[in-house]
Image: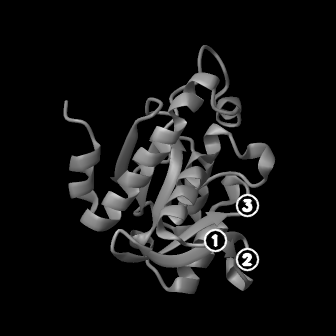
Amino acid sequence: MGLGNPGPGYAGNRHNVGAMVLDLLAERAGIRLSPGKGARSRAVSGEGRLAGRRVVLARPLTYMNESGGPVRGLLDYHKLPATDLVVVHDELDIDFAVVRLKRGGGEGGHNGLRSITRSLGTKDYLRVRVGIGRPPGRQDPADYVLKDFSATERKELDLLLVDAADAAESLLARGLEAAQNEVHPRS
């Protein structure tokens, strides 16, 4: 599940980096995303194979803070447990262009994650955390995430999207611990 806000006005926002990564994954796998019906109508989704596994790639058509309903609807429709869910999202608490993987944990003020956790009744799902860094100075984080990437960041954005998509594929192919060993830098 790639998180973001709907519509062209949000397309280049930092908050939409999860949706950007999802679109790259769909392109790599040759999966066409299309609107669902019924319980799935609040998301675009497509099924196929990625990293040697059957996957359902999806992006909510709701605003970020309402992501939980579409996620719950898709999991129910496909009869998947929350533990199989991988959410790709922006992360303020990670430096720009850094990708981290984890299962569970807090939402760190991220309204999309909060909505998903509330709808699922659990935090036990996988996350591909795409670093966007903290806002400069005293800028409000809510304003910062709804702004487009800066000109400097846009020069590195394609590489960040590739790194995050690679991390998601590694997570699917190898599991969390092995993918973390591959993706997270050694200190």
Sequence-wise, the earlier of marks 2 and 3 is 2
Q: Label 3's element?
A: loop
> For residue 39, which quarter of the picture?
bottom right
Residue located at (79% from left, 49% from top): 8
- Name the residue: 43% across, 33% down: 94
Quick one: label 2, few (<14), some, or many (20+) residues within 10 Å?
some
Q: Is residue 114 left or right of residue 38?
A: left
Q: Is residue 177 above or below residue 134?
A: below
> Which residue sits at x=49%, y=45%?
161
Mark 2 and 1 residues: CB-CB less than 8 Å, in contact? Answer: no
Q: Amino acid at mark 3?
A: Thr
Residue 22: image x %, image y %?
54, 58
Can I make out residue 104 in this image? no
Secondary structure, mark 2, is loop
Q: Is residue 78 left or right of residue 139?
A: left
Q: Which residue is mark 2?
A: 41
Q: How many marks?
A: 3
Q: Which residue is mark 1?
A: 33
Q: Amino acid at mark 1?
A: Leu
Q: Residue 62 shows which numbered tag?
A: 3
**Quadrant of the frame with the C terminus:** top left
Mark 1 is surrounded, within 10 Å at the Cα level, by few (under 14), some (14 to 19) or many (20 or more) other residues, namely some
